[in-house]
Amino acid sequence: MRSLIGFIRRNLRDIHYVYNTLVSVNFTGTLLAIAVIALTLTIPSIFYVFMQNFKESTSDLTIGRNITIYLKNDVDSVVAFQIKDDLQSDGRIKSAELITKDDGLKSFASSMGISEHEVMGNAENPLPHAVVLIPSEEVEASTENLDLLVKEIKNNKYVELVRVDRDWFKKINSITDAMRYITAVMAAILLLSLVFTLINTVSNRVLLHRNEIEVMKLVGATDFYIIRPYVYLGMWLGFLGCFVSWWLGTIVIFSTERYLNHVAEAYGTHIMFRGLNFRELLMMFVISTFICMLVSFISARSSINRIRPQ
Amino acid sequence: MIEFKSVSKIYQQGQIALQNISFKVNPGEFVYLTGHSGAGKTSLLQLIAVIERASIGQILFNDQDITDISLKKIPFLRRRIGMIFQDHHLMMNRTVAENVALPLLIRDYTEEESMDLVRQVLDKVGLRHKDEYYPYCLSTGEQQRVGIARAIVAHPDVILADEPTGNLDKGLSLDILDLFEMLHQDGTTVIMASHDIDLLATKPHRTLVLNRGHLVYDGEFSQFR
């Protein structure tokens, strides 16, 4: 119990020492270091938040996941209607629409800007009847269920080809992947800048207190004792940097929400922006504080090791 | 207590600071270390405090070989040594009491325990009334007393004083010497380096005389003169 109280007292004394000797003597430098750490954390965290919001928003777009069924060429329109009705009555399917071969031709000719006769001449229409399905939300939510439905449809003897429109999702996934990659790369680069900034800050503080450290070494202070205040300095810089970054990120995210929603509206969706949740915030604080402590420890240790008392 | 066995110190530039030095200091002894500037006095004290390492030979501290002592053990060895310097080595951004308390704080004494001991030792050096002053507010002699207070506060086995009166006038120097004498009377081992023969003559003790890195005399001060 006594040693625990001693430990707490010692640490409180260190924190007091950190403020008195490492922070207050170079307050501007400390603020600059906090600003650099805050900016370093803000940029990847903003990207992360945008990415999370983008992912959540695009998950709503699964409603557009169509299944197109191309029937065999010899299937006549009566059978095609029957197939459409059968599918329509399936609980797993939200809606089914038959596009007859004539409708298909019309649509094709219209997209080309010419008449149906100009497309085909006297030749027979080669297009098959097609049924466009929109699966129910339960099926959409599960790739397994969707695959099962597609497999069942494929087993129908009148079905030639089943195509699931996954292109849109592939695009979204590739955009998300790219954003994730950019975030990771940016975070890594900024982390390096944070490390260098901290190394510089801590080394400067050590140099500023060179005489004091020499005296400490002469009276028998261990390296750990001398390093400890610098580790606390790193801890505070990391914590405060993260705190500033949190607010900065929140301001940036919510101030850009309106503009990003203009873009989202063009794609028929709306993005409900949310900042970092408690778990993510806690992680950010822990990681920032830990990294700053670790870097401060390494930097202080190497700088202090080089100081030899005279 | 402290024993040098054929110790030499050669710096990287090839400069020989000490050559084949052998002597022994017993517990409770008061030993002067004298010689001209550059004779090797500071180097010898630095070897005891492991600020420098011996190039050749063996150094024993309380029968423990400290010649190749590991880096991790050095702080613990230095806690058994009180060091006093000509330029005091005080922390100017800390008060007198905080400076003196430093050796106690690194030994994990509580604030209250430290301050009790600090007050006692400041009484001893006559600076109790200036415990809240910053060193730059003190005279050179007072700063030296703070240095002495810091060196003795944790009751070290030995006091190493390197030209402690170097910057002081005759009167202050004698005061400081009186302080060392008092510590010696209390049973502390004292090794004091000084080139001021006249000062040492006022309170003669065993004297080691160095000349260009060689130990040329080891005996009573009166016989040396």
Image (cartoon, coloured by chain):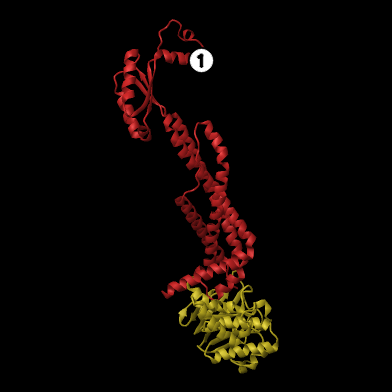
Residue B205, picture quadrant: bottom right
Q: In the rendered view, would you say B160 is above or below A282?
A: below
Place of residue A62 in the rendered image (x, y in percent of width and height, measured from the top left): 42, 32
Which chain is home to disc 1? A
Place of residue B158 in the rendered image (x, y in percent of width and height, measured from the top left): 53, 84
Residues A83 and B169: in front is: A83
Place of residue B72 in the rendered image (x, y in percent of width and height, measured from the top left): 48, 71
- Kindly indicate which chain is depicted in red in the rendered structure: A
Kind of residue at disc 1: Met
- Kindly indicate which chain is depicted in yellow in the rendered structure: B
Residues B105 and B165: in front is: B105
| Secondary structure state at the residue bearing disc 1 | helix
Q: In the rendered view, would you say A225 is above or below B44?
A: above
Residue found at x 55% / y 90%: B184
Q: Quadrant of the N terminus of chain A?
A: bottom left
Residues A310 and A222: in front is: A222
Residue at the spot of label 1: A112
